[in-house]
Structure formats: C-alpha cells, structure tokens
Amino acid sequence: MTKRIQAKHKISRRLGVNLWGTAKSPVNARAYGPGQHGQRRRKPSDYGLQLAAKQQLKGYYGNLTEKQFRRVVDEATRRKGESTENLIGLLESRLDAVVYRSNFVASVFAARQFVNHGHVAVNGRRVTIPSYRLKPGDVVSVREKSRQLTIVLEATQRREREVPDYIDVDYDKLTASYNRMPQLAEVPYPVQMDPKQIIEYYSR
C-alpha cells in the first residue's frame, strides 16, 4: 500500500498539479517539478502540451500502462461521435473508476486493488477486473463479506468526493448504479483535462 501512495505522490509532483485534489499532495507545498531543475520555467512545445495532457489523464485513472491507455484511445476514435467525449466516457465506465467515484474507497489506486481482491460484484456477479467496462443500468455492489472492511467504512463515512449525476449510490446497501456514459463537462476532475490534446498526440 505504501508503494502505491508514494507512486501517486510522485505522479502529482512530476506533473506539477494536484491530480486528485487531495490535501496531502506534495504539490500543495511545492508547485513545481522535482529535481535540481524542477523550478525552471520553459514554454512547452505543442508536443509537450499534448504529452502533458496524456500523462495527466493516464495518471488520474491509476497510472494506466501505455498499452491500456492506447487501446482506449483507439476505441474512442473508432466510435461514432466526438472522439474526445468518447475517450472520457470509456474511462469513466471502468469498474475501478465507478468504485472510486462512489466513495467506496479512498483512491483510484485503492479501487483497483479492491476490485482485484474480489470485493466487488456487478449485477450480483463477482468481478475482479478493474478495467471491466460497465454498461448503462449496471449495478456495482460491495460484496457482503467486504462491507465491514476498514477501508470501506472510512471512505463511506468521509465521502470526500462529490458523486456525479451519472452514478446513483445507496450507502445503506453499498451499491452504485451506473446510469449512462458521461460527457466531459459532467466529470468532476480536480484539474482541467484536455482530451483534445490527447487525440492529437496519438494522431501524429
């Protein structure tokens, strides 16, 4: 668990933004990059802006691997409609993202581990794949034997994040209904995301 927390802080520090809006983020005290030259200010190139946008969004969802993220981008561009909106919608339909949005655990990293360890069910069926894609109408639930875990009790009591309109949560039953794929403007990111730059990055 410690390794995950350190990695999360390193991601925020490297990107220079409080990526998850947490009070303990090192960016709150040092809003510049790490290392000897971290405080140098250079005007980024177009490529640099695109790369930063990609790293920011990829990091937000638990620091996805390049292969995983590229697969989502490719599907977003293949689908009908606006690629940027498709990209956000696909990422938000991940099972670990919905567990995180529902405040069942404290972080997206914890959400991934929580799903991996078999604590979550979708429509009553146990699912252990964090990238499992939910469909509108699916119901995510914390399994009965996992509801008294400290990580769940603390997260549901604090409810540190606002639950967006496209998810309905019942904290008495510890269930979350995924209603629909959201638009970018509906997703409560703590920092500004720019999926257009990401699509341009992969279309080079």
Image (spheres, helix red, strand yellow):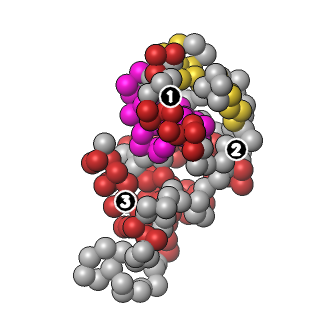
Circle nearer the N terminus (1, 2): 1
Going by the numbered disc 2, the residue's amino acid type is Pro
Which residue occupies the extreme left position in the image? 36
Q: Which residue is mark 3?
A: 9
| Residue 113 image point, x, y percent | 38, 34
| Residue 201 image point, x, y percent | 49, 61
Q: Which residue is mark 1?
A: 132
Circle nearer the N terminus (3, 2): 3
Crowding around mark 3 (Cα neighbors within 10 Å: few <14, some 14 to 19, many 20+) is: some
Residue 75 visible within the image: no
In this rendering, would 29 be left or right of 93? left
| Residue 36 image point, x, y percent | 25, 81
Q: Nearer the viewer, residue 84 or 145?
A: 145
Going by the numbered disc 1, the residue's amino acid type is Tyr
Magenta stretch, residue numbers: 94-118
Q: Which residue is mark 2?
A: 164
Residue found 58% across the figure and 22% down from its top:
141
Q: CA distance from mark 3 to mark 2?
A: 25 Å
Q: Secondary structure at mark 3?
A: helix
Is residue 114 placed above or below 194 in the rendered structure? above
In this rendering, would 130 be left or right of 80? left
Q: Are marks 3 and 2 in contact (CB under 8 Å)?
A: no
Q: Are marks 1 and 2 in contact (CB under 8 Å)?
A: no
- Viewer-nearest of labels 1 and 2? 2
Residue 145 visible within the image: yes
Residue found 37% across the figure and 59% down from its top:
9
